[in-house]
Amino acid sequence: VAGNLQIAFDSLGVASVYALLGVSITLIFGLTGIVNFAQGQFMMLAAYIVWALASTGINFFAALALGVIAMVALGIIADQGLFRFTLRRPISGFIVSLGLIPIITVAVEEFWTDNPLTLVPPFTTVWHVGGVSIVSERLLEIGMSAAILLALAVVLRWTHLGRALRAAAEDREMTGMLGVNTGRLITVTWAIGSAVVAVAGGLWVTLYPIQPEFGQTYIFYGFAAALIGGLGSVGGAVIAAIVTAEAEGFLGRYVASTWTDAYVLGLMMLILMIRPTGIFKGATGSALT
Amino acid sequence: MTHRRSTDDIGGLTNTGRALDDKVPDRNLTVAEDGSDRASARQTGVWLGGIGGSAGIVALVVLPLIVTSAENRSLATTAVIYAIVALGLGMTYGRLGLLAMSQPGIWGVGAYTAAVLMQSCGLTFAEATLGAVAAGLIAGCVSALPAFRLSGHYLLIAGFILTALLVDVEGNLSITDGQNGLVLTNPLGSLAGIKLSSQTGFYYVALFVLFVGMVVDMAVTRSRLGRKFGAVRESRLLAASLGISARASIVTCYTIAGAFAGAGGALFVASLQFVVPDEFGINAAVMLPLIVMIGGVRRTWGPVLGAFVVVFLPQFIHLQPYQATAANGVLLIVIILLLPEGLLGGLSRLIARTRVTWTTTRAGANG
């Protein structure tokens, strides 16, 4: 039992990163209709920025905050410089994001290194509760992700900005006619999406070694969360991320671990074929919930 | 022929589905040159296209005689192979309007099929290529299934997932030797008197396959099948109302594309004598659409031009191989944002515009 609890807890830590990645994908898709396949690379870049800043000796949380600011700036640049021009042709937006993948990967290889990098986490305490060792670092990761996702849910549900975002996701033109600056909303969405993914990357580097290719690997888990939850559904992405990560953890433990990627990919394919709008999103559901 | 349809045509369209094939040429559905002198510009385009095509064939045939360094010759072979695979993607994207992101994965299926057949089963190159084409046909046919239910982004993602799944499977199976890759050790032998181990010989074998592929592409485009693809591309609903099965068109197109990918895979593995799963992953998924877009969508010569640009440009501007993937990314974004019709599309528009300006200027001078 303790072993299983351990897997469940550890997978929850992984799930929180998948959830952040999935939510950032789903947010941007919900408002702009653009599937940003480079979001995994954004996460990888954020991890490298946080690593580089933290390696200079400054406080980890300061490094994380600076990393978030850098990624928000980059997200706004990507929006204004690239994706703004593909708003009317979302497929072109997808292809542009495809082009960003090797660019970011090679840029990181050029600036830093191809070799795996690790960072000493800010907390290293380990608690033992009923045979389960709880690494404080993982707890921080879960707590921070939960706080961010909760804050996002509150913003989307109860603030003027959230209402405007949801309205624009439903019908951008109509929302614009009602006096909302939808152009600025899109920029705000890119900023939020990039900030969320920056936190995901910054937390990841404290848990696992990072390499330029890791964005490519995890983009599929982010997409699994976004797709299974239903593109545009934030709550769905969170639940799907937890299910995916737990399934990955337990399948890896009890079935062959080399095939976990294939399981997740197969599951995504199945969901796409059976219910393309995702499990948690009704056929007529709101575009951003 | 113009885009305009007379009432007779519409009457004909509603009578039988067959009428669509005969009366609405594919090109005019979408390629509508602006300007009053449209017919004349089209005519110019036709004979300029003929000259360009002939020049292209001549250039490809004499290329090994001009290019003497071994490195450039092997790059030329690579470009021809990329062109074959991209021709398939160009068909699904250009003719049918669906970007089959499963194409890189199926390319890998072809490569691994050929590699296993040659290495483990001891088949000759020709037999292995036929096997790879068969595998490509089957994989292409199966990869069409998501297109029945999905469209837009969901279809793109489904294709991408299929590619990732195939790469993952190739990386985990023992018969493919997993991530280590598969090395071919058996000699290639010869085919129809051509020594396959000779660089020039292999180039001509690949070029022959490319020409076959281009003939297939042109034949499909000019046939009823191509016009059916065009109808499905413009509107599945309209196509269905005319008795054209969108599903049959999709399966046919994906299957042909799969065969191209299979043949390209066999040539790829035979030319390198080595294959790793990652070759057909994300970088191929960036490169193949790039090749199609650079040259120009819905043009048989598009992927050929695109492949040569993608292969030779990094070498031309002295980039390391890993930097070339980033160059591909930059090029893809630039083409999408600035030249969505590709090089050939931009060129033909330029010619059409020049021609129109020229005729109007002359008419002005005469009047």
Image (cartoon, grey):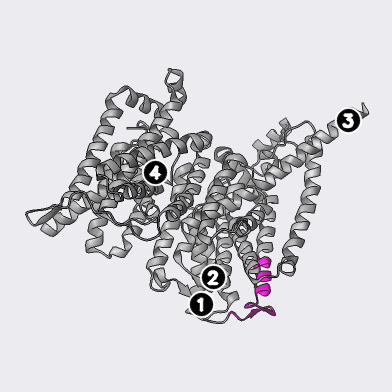
Location of residue B75 with respect to B242 vertically, above or below: below
| Front residue of A88 and B46 | A88
| Drawn side of residue B202 relative to residue B360, left or right | left
Q: Residues at marks 3 and 4, common chain?
A: no
Q: Decide: few, some or many residues near mark 2? Use Cα within 10 Å; few <14, some 14-19, many ≥20.
A: many
Q: Where is residue B124 in the image (x, y as percent from the top left)?
A: 57, 79
Q: Which chain carries label 2?
A: B
Question: Which mark is first along the chain, 1 or 2?
Answer: 1
Q: Which chain carries label 3?
A: B
Question: Amino acid under label 1?
Answer: Leu
Give the labeled residue for mark 4.
A276
In space, the residues marked 2 and 3 are separated at their CA atoms by 57 Å
Question: Which mark is first along the chain, 3 or 2?
Answer: 2
* Comparing labels 3 and 4, the label whose residue is closer to the camera: 3
Give the labeled residue for mark 3.
B363
Label 1: which secondary element: loop
Q: Where is residue B36 in the image (x, y as percent from the top left)?
A: 78, 31
Give the labeled residue for mark 1.
B184
In space, the residues marked 1 and 4 are separated at their CA atoms by 41 Å
